[in-house]
Structure formats: structure tokens, C-alpha cells
Amino acid sequence: MSGDDEPTTDGSRDDEPTADRSTPDGPDPGALGVAGPAVERAGHGHERLSFTRSRLIEEGWTRERLLGLFVVWCLLVPVVLPSFQVYLFTEFLLLAVFATAFNLLYGYTGLLSFGHALFYAAAGYAIALTFRELGPELAGVLGGISPLATLLVAVVLGLAFTLVIAAPVGYLSVRLDEIYFALITLSFSMAFYAVLIQDPYGLTQGSDGMLLLLGTVELFGADVALADRNLYYYLVLAVAGGSMYAMWRVINSPFGTVCRAIRESPDRVSALGVNVTYHQWVMFVVSAFFVGIAGLFIAPLHSIVTPAMSFWTTSAIPVVAAVIGGAFYFLGPAVGAFVFLYLRWGLSRYPAFEAHWELFYGLVLILVLLYFKEGAAAGLVALGHWLEDLYGVYRTDGRSAAIEFVRSTLSEKAAAVRREVGRTSVRGRRSARGQVATAGGGSDSTDPGGGSDSTDPGSGSDSTDPTDPTDRPSGGDRP
Amino acid sequence: MFPLFVAETLIGLSIGGRLFLIAVGLSLIFGVLNVLNFAHGVFYMLGAYGAITVSALLLDNFWLGAAVGIVAVGIVGAIVEFGLIRPLYDRDEAILDQLILTFGVAMIVHELARMLWGSQPRSIPTPGSLDFSVGILGETITAYRLFVIGVSVVVLVGLWLFLTRTHHGHVIRATASDREMAAMLGVDVPRLYTTVFLLGSLLAGLGGALAAPLQAVSPALGDQIIIDAFVVVVIGGLGSISGAFVGAMLVGLFQAFGVQYIAAGDLALPFIAMILVLVFRPRGLLGEDEVL
């Protein structure tokens, strides 16, 4: 429908040409927290949707209720799921914090860090060292509740250590941009890795890593193991929930808004008198702080810290999660973390695939980058809108109309996918030549709507391209 | 007089030669295409495996095996550029998207290599024709190591002559400095990009194939070597070929001397050097706007 007469702005990658529009400020049951450009693209076609949506809200399906349902589910996890699943869900919560914190920089400030493992490992080693060095001494003073006290001290020390590292590292890093920023963060984390593995001061036990056992607390005569899966799960749930809420507040503060503007166009924001590098620096430190929280609590879960925590492949985890999940949504990286962990778990049930889960990540990563730049979260939002539409049609026109709606939208979708695959395979050929037109048209990197919008880049060349993409034989004019 | 220095210098230059062969392709691709190719390390690893497999199983000749391996890597590189990287050139954040995309390619190739060859490290003996020792200033070094140093110098000079003295070289440099203008003047930029990517991948394959007799080869080799290559190209200057040579030799000497004179922490030295370069001279020691 709309995709045909408007191939330029309407998104080569929009999943649902009609239903993919979100209202910027209305309550959104999808609740995935749209970040910048997706909001700006919200436009035609949401009149009908907002009708359905207001209907749903009248019936009580508000964002708060959905969030409440999720919280209830989280609280019930240890009750309804087997022990291993509780472990996996705990890991998911921490990985979600890790990826979301990374995305404060990537999705919300426009800086791709390839070295966030540094803060993850720094906090993990801090807690392990605290338990090894201070644990016995505190036990002598405090007796039964010493593990709890040690944990508190470790959290404070770990976060302080993370901040002490993050401030200078961030200060030096944010002065560089794009690829150079990625490379300097990478080298900081690799330098830390080298120090950990060579262990020049005999602190970290080199490549063996350090064991970390939380111990048992004596409270009111009862022994409570801090590392008990269910107890630890609730601890992590509280920490992760608090962290996510804090990051949500950061992003929606005036400070976060400025950072989003910086992502769209550093030059313009700078021209408005904003100190761009200062904002980037502060966001870097905030991001590192929350990565530190994830590192602090993942270490006791794994019961061990190793230098691999700081190796660049660990830094790649939040990158993969953010890209797969969708970096332009607040919850995108969390969705990506979920996919990351549960895809691996699902594959582990098939021995043939188990050892090769990276292969699937690589494939998913490439597919997402090529065809679904907005990630899984965008897919979920589109699915939510589609279900809303379906519900609206069902309520007004009955069941047969709903079935017809399903059939027509699905075939439309299939056509859009075919068109998109055809376009992508020929776009490269046009790209370098079309670049001339792009430069001439002035719709370059300063395009306000397209700062990091995946759907936009085609527009520069498309707008001067008379051929309708639908007429193009798919892949026909490959060289 | 200083026998220790001679020995370490020779080892350093030998490591540097290997590093240059991996870094030069990375730098060439970045200089022309503006793509930082994370998959370059796995191409190197593929080159090594190609040389080992073909020479061990099929041809029983290291040189032929290496040649087949190098060509195979070049073809893989060209396919990756044509099929995956090309659609992303005109995105706003092309450079970051391409970095992440090539990282995905690296993951896939890494796993495929594990499926094909297993996780066990492999090695092959030094080719017989070069398996003898040469004495230099009282120190001995295997002729094969000298050969690798020689190849790196030949590649440096060859690329320099190609880029400065031939028509195709001029076109490549023109496209690197202004691709819109080159396209307007009739250069088939997409084809040139694929060709340069192919050339860079061939160089990665060459480095891997020649390194196969010098080190244990495992699927994780790509993950390690790509970081070394990043260090080298950043120190020398991203996109600069002579910079890659200087960077490679410096890092090679760092590693050779660091082992001897720094009790612990020599592993961190290259990264600290990389940080210092990025902070004080982000374009690298020899980095300019030109490809050379």
C-alpha cells in the first residue's frame, strides 16, 4: 500500500507498512520505549490505530498493567521454573542490564564502544578480591553476618573502582569518534586483559582466574546461603529492576535528551552551545557504572572471574544483543540479551548445534543488519500493532473480516519482503554512483530524520532514481 | 658486540613481517573502502588452514598448497564484499554497521572452521627448501623466517609501485580520496571496491599461509590476530600502507624485546602504545589522508 507510492521514506525495512506507526506520546501498550527517529517517522495511518488503542486502554490494558504483569511473572520465576531455569533467568537479567547500559552509549549517544568488558571485568574482579582479602578479616569482627557485610563493602568498592577507571578512560575516549572511539575502548579493555592474565603483582591468579564464593550468613539462628539460587535471584531482580528504572530515568531526563540530540547531529548540538564531549563523557561514566553493576553480580553467579571477562569477545556480547534487539528502543538490548541467552540454551538441546551456537549468532546478526536494522524490538512493536489492528477489525466487523485482514496483511508483508530482498541486492550497485546525487542533494549525514535511521540511507539515491523499486526484477541487474 | 640485541632484533623483524602481511590488507581496505574489516583475522586463519590442508592432503607441496589457500581466501573475501558489505555503503552509520557485520562474518567463519578442522591446533613443518639456518652477526635464524621478512618487504615495495606507478593504482588512490568525484569521472566504483577487497583478502591469505609453518594454527587464531592487526594499523595510521609496515616492525620489536627486558606486562605494552597513539596522534605515526 503505502510502500509503493513512497518507497523513499517508507522504509525498506519497515516490517508492517500500514501498522508500523506508533503514536509518539500516547500510552503505548507495546511499552518498548521508542527512542528517537522512530518517533519522528510516526505519521500517517495511526488514526485508526489510536482508536483501537484507546479502546484497549479503556478496557484496562495500560502500560502499567503490562509492566505489573511482567513484575508478577518475575516474582514467580523461582516458584514455577526449575532450578536451572532460575539460573538462566538470573543471567538474563544481568545481561540485560549489561546490554542496556552499553546501549546508553551506542543507541542513545551514538558511540560504539568495543571495550565495555573492561568495566564488567573490573567490577567482577573487585568483588572477588574483596571477598578474598577482606572476607576473612570481616568474619573475625562481625561473625555470622560477615558475608552480607562483605557483599555490601564489595558492591561499594566495586562501583567505586569502576568509576575510578571509567572517568579517565572515558575522558580520553570521547575525544575520538566513530571507529577511533571503538578502537581506543577496545585497546583499554585489552590492556586490562593483558594485565589480568600476566598478573604482575600476584593479585589475580593470572589465566586461572579467581574463585568467588559468597558464603553463608547466620541470621537469627538460621543459616542462609547467600548464593542460594532463589535468594540470589531475588537479590538480582531487585538490583536489575532498580538499574533499569534508573537508566530509564537517565534517558528521559533533559540530559538524556541532549545526548539523543548529539547522536542525531553532534555538529548542530555543538552549534547550539552544548558541550558535546562533556555530555558524552558523563554518559560514558554512567554507562560504565551500570555495566559495573552487571559485572558485580554476575561474578558470584558464575562463582569465578577469569581474564576472559575483559577479552574483546565479552565486549562483543552487548554489541550483538543491542543490534539484534534493536538499539533504538530502550528495551531493545534487553530483548537482544533474551534472544542471545535463550537461543544458546535452545541450541544446547541439540548436540549437533550446541558447539556451534556462534554460527547462528553470526547469521542472525548479519540478517538483522541487512534487513531489520531496527531489530527484534521493532518486530515486537509491529506485531503488537498488528494484533491491535486485528482486534479492532474483529470487534467492529466480526470474525470473517478478521480472517480476511490476516490474509491480506500477510500477503502484503510477503510482497514487501520480496521487494526488499530484491532492492538490497541491487542497491549496492547503485550506491557508489548514487552517492553523487546524494552529495548534490545535500541530504547527507546532517539529515535530521536520518541520523541513525536505517531506513533513510536509501533515500539519497532513491529520490533521484526514477525506477520504481517494484518494477525491478529482483537481483536482475547484478553485474 | 651486542649478540642479544641481534637475536632479538631478528626475532622482532620476523614477527613484524608476519604482522605486516596481516595488517597491510586491513589498512588497504580501510584506506580505500573506509571499511574496518573485523573478518580480516579469520581470512588470515583460513589462509593458514588452506595451506595446511591442501599441502598435507592433496598436493604434498607447501608452495602449491599456499597458493591454492591464498586464492580461496581471496574468493571468499570478494563474495563477502559483494554479497554483504556492499548493501551498506550508503547508510549513515555505514562504518559502524560494516564493523558489526564483518564481526558477524568472523563468528560464522570461525565456527565453520571449527566444524571443518576441529579445535585442535595444527602445524606443518617448515618447507624443506628453506629449512636451514643462516648466520647473521653471530646469531642464527632459519632461512624461512628471513624469507617471510623478505616477502613483507617485497609486498610493501610492490604495493607502493602498484599504487604510484600504474594506471590502476592511480585510479584506486583517486577513488580513495574522493569516491564521488571518481564515480563522476567514470570509475566503476563498486567493481573497484570489490577488487580492492579481493586484493586485501589475498594479502590476509598470504600472511596466514606463510605463517602456517611458524605457529600453531587453530580456529581461534583469527580472534587473536585481528587484535594484533588493529594495534599495528592504529599505531602506523589507519589506511596507510607504509604506516602498517612501520607499525608492524615496531610491534614486532616491542614483543621481542618486551619478553627480555620487562618482567611482566609486555602483553599490555602494544595496547598502551595504541592508546597513546590514539590520544596524541589519532591518525597514527604515518597516517595522512593518502593511501600510502
Image (cartoon, coloured by chain):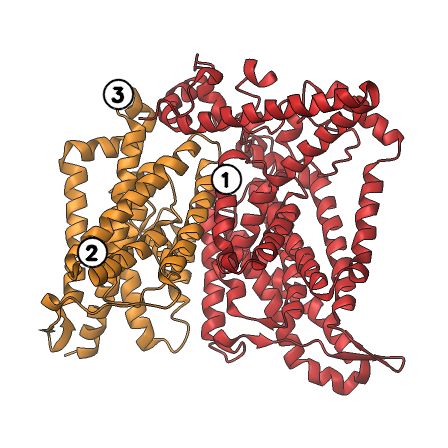
Chain colours: A red, B orange
Report helix, strand or loop for mark 2. helix
- Name which residue lies at 11% across and 78% down: B138
Q: Mark 2 vs mark 3: which is more N-terminal? A: 2
- Left or right: residue A457 versus residue B80 is right
> In which quadrant is the C terminus of chain A drawn?
top left
> In which quadrant is the N terminus of chain A drawn?
top right
- Name which residue lies at 67% across and 70% down: A300
Q: Is residue A443 visible?
A: no
Residue B123: image x %, image y %?
Answer: 27, 68
Residue A152: image x %, image y %?
Answer: 75, 70
Quadrant location of residue B111? bottom left
Quadrant location of residue B62? bottom left
Which residue is under mark 2? B66
- Name which residue lies at 36% across and 26% down: A429
Mark 1 Cα-neighbour bin, 10 Å: few <14, some 14–19, many ≥20: some
Real-space Cα separation, disc 2 to disc 1, in angstroms: 33 Å
In depth, the one of A433 and A198 nearer the eye is A433
How many labels, in total?
3
Which residue is under mark 1? A367
Chain under callout 1: A
Report the amino acid beneath label 3.
Leu
Mark 2 Cα-neighbour bin, 10 Å: few <14, some 14–19, many ≥20: many
User: Contact (CB < 8 A) between labels 2 and 1?
Assistant: no
Report the amino acid beneath label 1.
Leu
Real-space Cα separation, disc 3 to disc 1, in angstroms: 34 Å
User: Contact (CB < 8 A) between labels 3 and 1?
Assistant: no
